[in-house]
Amino acid sequence: MFKSFCAKALNESGLATLWFSSFNAKLLCAQRFIRLVAYGSSTLILVSYLSALEISKAKIGLFMTLTLVGDTGLSFIFTIFADSLGRKAVLISGAVLMSAAGAIFALCGNYWVLLVAAVIGVISPK
Amino acid sequence: MRHALSFLLIHIPSGNEIGPFRAIEESTLAQITTEESRGDIYAWYSLLGALGSALGLGICGWVLDFLLNGLGWNTIKAYKAIFWGYSALGGIMLCFVLALSTECEIAKYSSAMKDSDASSDDESSQKRKSLPFWKAVKFSHKSRIIVIKLCILFALDSFACSLAPLFVLNSSLLQ
């Protein structure tokens, strides 16, 4: 009784499907999870970090806008060419850009350097 | 009341994520899953995303609190530590990506797609092949209209989603 209930719950919730899916599908889900943990943490502190560096509000506004524009442009180009360049290659460069952007934010406090890192690199502004 | 409202609106799950990853991952998932399992996998894919986002916000808050109040670090040093964490998570993601197999590439389907393209409209596909942009964008004629319609719909959705929380949050916090 209990066993069949568990089996049904696993089936209905789709956990069973996830469990029996290919290794690649699990990896894709896991990498999204990890990425959004990172995005969540950076979103919270991005604006506070910039104001702690004593950057004016207008400049912070410009920063957020340009970051969003940069990320949108980058996503567009990356996604358009993903299938011809190879999906894995594009995902690898994205992950490298993400890691590099984080490192630059940790190492440097200069507004313009951070702006370039946020526009070219992958930092989630929202 | 106002805060409760802003809380509700901010947490509308739009599933939007900026960056080059999501579109590639979703199209890859569509390719490597069977039709019956696809719905379940997509559901877990987006749920894990939402969970990750929430966990990231939570962990960031706890860690910041610990660094600032527990260890007495100054703000900038604590923020920089969080960005090191961000960079490290990027590194972990890189490991996951490196572990993906060639099953994820589109190679299997591209030859079939070229064939159907060539048979449907030979001339225009010839023309398209000369341009690098259209070479990269392999829309079949059939899907183009659906893609355009969906793009307009999603653009509207994103536009509205990005307006409402900001507007409500600002007005509720300023008053």
Image (cartoon, grey):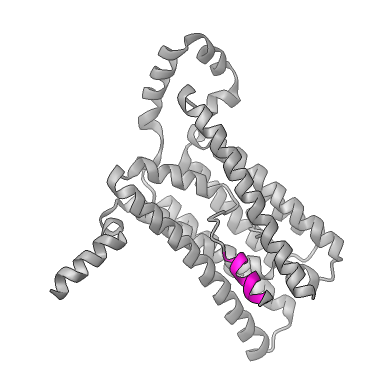
Count of numbered labels shown in the rendering: 0
In the image, which residues are magenta? B3-11
From the top left corner, tell me how far across and down residue A103 is, in percent.
64, 62
From the top left corner, tell me how far across and down residue B60 is, in percent.
59, 75
Look at 41% across and 35% down and name the residue there.
B106
Look at 48% across and 61% down and name the residue there.
B49
Look at 15% across and 68% down and name the residue there.
A4
- Which residue is at the far left? A1
- Which residue is at the far top? B123
Q: Is residue B100 above or below residue B46?
A: above
Quadrant hosting residue A59: bottom right
Q: Is B70 on the left-hand or right-hand side of B141?
A: right
Quadrant hosting residue B120: top left
Image quarter in which the C terminus of chain A is found: bottom right
From the top left corner, tell me how far across and down residue B5 is, in percent.
64, 71
- Would you say residue A15 is visible in this rendering? no
Q: Is residue A52 above or below residue A113?
A: below
Q: Quick one: A32 or B148, which is closer to the camera? A: B148
From the top left corner, tell me how far across and down residue A76 is, in percent.
61, 40
Image quarter in which the N terminus of chain A is found: bottom left
Q: Is A67 on the left-hand or right-hand side of A91?
A: right
Quadrant hosting residue A115: bottom right
Does residue A55 show up magenta in the picture? no
